[in-house]
Amino acid sequence: MLIVGIAGGTGSGKTTVVRKIVNEFPNGEVVVLPQDAYYRDNSHIPFEERQKINFDHPDSVEFPLLIEHIKMLKSGQKINMPVYSYITCLRSKDTIEVAPARVIIVEGILILVDAELRKLFDIKVFVDADADDRLGRVIIRDIAERGRSVMQVLERYHETVKPSHLQFIEPSKRYADIIIPGGGENDTGIGVLISMIRQHLQKETLTDHA
């Protein structure tokens, strides 16, 4: 099993990179664990307070559960991945069953921040993108998917997203084995990563047949 961690700032193009990788291995060889599924349940906090949560701070993520789930997959066990809603800022009662696969991709803005989580990754990737490009994508996404207005997005960006990016996410880039500049449009960088994954799978197949 190969475990790949793909980090990068909000709106950097991580999801596009992941989608392009998954499209290259269509036979169920790759499963994705998004960090977004592992935001802490905030049902004990009033709705107005939940809307102020800083999702770009490491404290917002339940890293121990994510680490436990990766270890379970490595040992051949299925997991029940949480489902999280950005609109209510709550975990759903439903979960998604995820079975082990040859490649596990863990994707999220903060996944290279946690030292214990980093140890589990065979390949660590940071998707880099210009701050203005990231902000543009965040505005479009948050209006379409999270029910926010342009003013709410900009306010949140300046109050929490940008400071947390500079404090936590940008410094985590130094842990990456591969940096993909230009986000999801960098087909050369993504191609290098896909080649590394393919080589690993070929080696694994040869070992299995030896």
Image: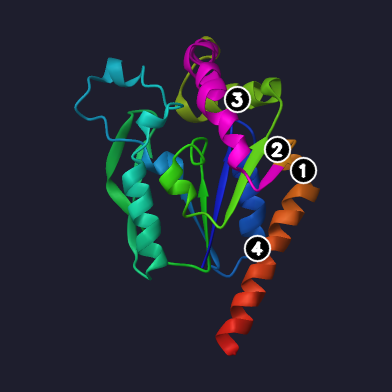
Q: Earlier in the sequence, mark 2 or mark 3?
A: 3
Q: Using the numbered discs, state the Cα–Cα distance from disc 3 to disc 4 in whole angstroms.
A: 31 Å
Q: Which residue is mark 1?
A: 186
Q: Using the numbered discs, state the Cα–Cα distance from disc 4 to disc 1 in whole angstroms.
A: 17 Å
Tag 1: amino acid = Asn
User: Residue 132: x and y, percent?
Assistant: 69, 20
The numbered disc on residue 143 is none
| Mark 1 crowd level (few <14, some 14–19, many ≥20, 10 Å Cα) | some
Mark 3 element type: helix
Tag 4: amino acid = Ile
Asked whether the viewer can see residue 201, the reply is yes
Residue found 76% across the figure and 48% down from its top: 189
Q: Which residue is mark 3?
A: 140
**Magenta-highlighted residues:** 152-179
Q: Earlier in the sequence, mark 3 or mark 1?
A: 3
**Mark 4 and mark 3 in contact (Cβ < 8 Å)?**
no
Q: Could you say which quadrant of the image residue 8 lies in?
A: top right
Tag 2: amino acid = Gly
Q: Earlier in the sequence, mark 4 or mark 2?
A: 2
Which residue of the protein is positioned furthest toward the right in this rendering? Answer: 188
Q: Using the numbered discs, state the Cα–Cα distance from disc 2 to disc 1 in whole angstroms.
A: 6 Å
Which residue of the protein is positioned furthest toward the left in this rendering? Answer: 44
For the residue pair 192 and 114, the one nearer the viewer reads as: 114
Q: Could you say which quadrant of the image residue 183 lies in?
A: top right
| Mark 4 crowd level (few <14, some 14–19, many ≥20, 10 Å Cα) | many
Query: Comparing marks 2 and 3, which lies closer to the viewer?
Result: 2
Q: Which residue is mark 2?
A: 183
Q: Using the numbered discs, state the Cα–Cα distance from disc 2 to disc 3 in whole angstroms.
A: 16 Å
> Does residue 38 lie above or below 134 as drawn?
below
Query: Comparing marks 3 and 4, which lies closer to the viewer?
Result: 4
The numbered disc on residue 197 is 4
